[in-house]
Image (spheres, rainbow, N blue to C red):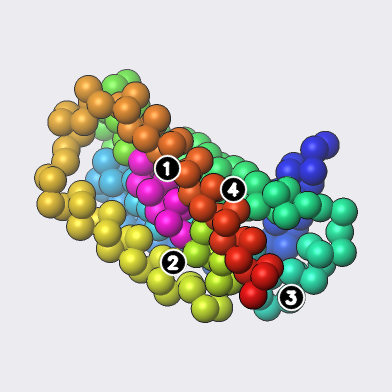
Amino acid sequence: MTAVARMTVLHLRTVAPYRTQGLLVFGVIVLIDSRSLVGLLPALALLLAPLVAAQPFLVADKADLQTLYAVLPLSRRTVLLGHYAWALMSFFAIVITGTALAALLAQAQHMAFGGRSLATLLTLSWALFAVNISIQLPLLIRFGYTRISVLATTVPLALVMLAVIRVHLDLESIQDWLPLFWAAGAAAIATSAALASCASSQRQRS
């Protein structure tokens, strides 16, 4: 197992006691969007996935895990990449679970679900998550959860939602842009990781 994988497993163990909160948010989102499956996956990616991605920072601030990270044989780069690996793992786990549940709900309601529409929903979910997490993680790494939790969630959500509303996106209008959305999301996260590395250095010096 690589050092980054071990860091991701450590995150999984530290957030496990808080899983009820995530399950509750998951249930509320499913309840709200169960009749309109178009919004289910984007809502999970926009609201739940960043919440789970930020959970290790909440635990770290409460339990002073920064001290533990310092004594473990883990480099600063490994810790940083572990945060991003955890965020990506959370996104894919949530979206896969949400897709399976949406398929079951669609079958129960005799609704069409799949094909190009599903690919578009997954792409939109990825773009929303990538934008959110690209803003959130560098701030959390630089300032910690206690100081930045409101800014790291409310502001990205407001910006993303405003952008979606202003350009009046619909599923058909973005189907020709799907590869670009995936590439732009990956580029945003890569840029975010570079910024987070600088933020981590600044936090160590402060």
Report the residue marked by disc 2.
152
Amino acid type at circle 2 is: Ala
Q: Is residue 152 left or right of residue 86?
A: left
Q: Which mark is residue 84?
A: 4
- Alpha-carbon span between mark 3 and mark 4: 20 Å
Residue 95 position in % (x across, y down): 47, 41
What kind of residue is marked 3? Answer: Asp
The dominant secondary structure in magenta is: helix
Rendered view: 158 above or below 88: below
**What SS does tag 3 mark?**
loop
Q: Write down the region rendered in magenta.
A: 125-136
Q: Amino acid at mark 1?
A: Ala
> Around disc 3, counting alpha carbons within 10 Å, would you say few (fewer than 14), some (14 to 19), or many (20 or more)?
few
Left or right? Give the position of 97 relative to 66: left
Q: Earlier in the sequence, mark 4 or mark 1?
A: 4
| Lower sequence index among marks 1 and 2 | 2
Query: As displayed, is residue 156 above or below residue 109?
Result: below
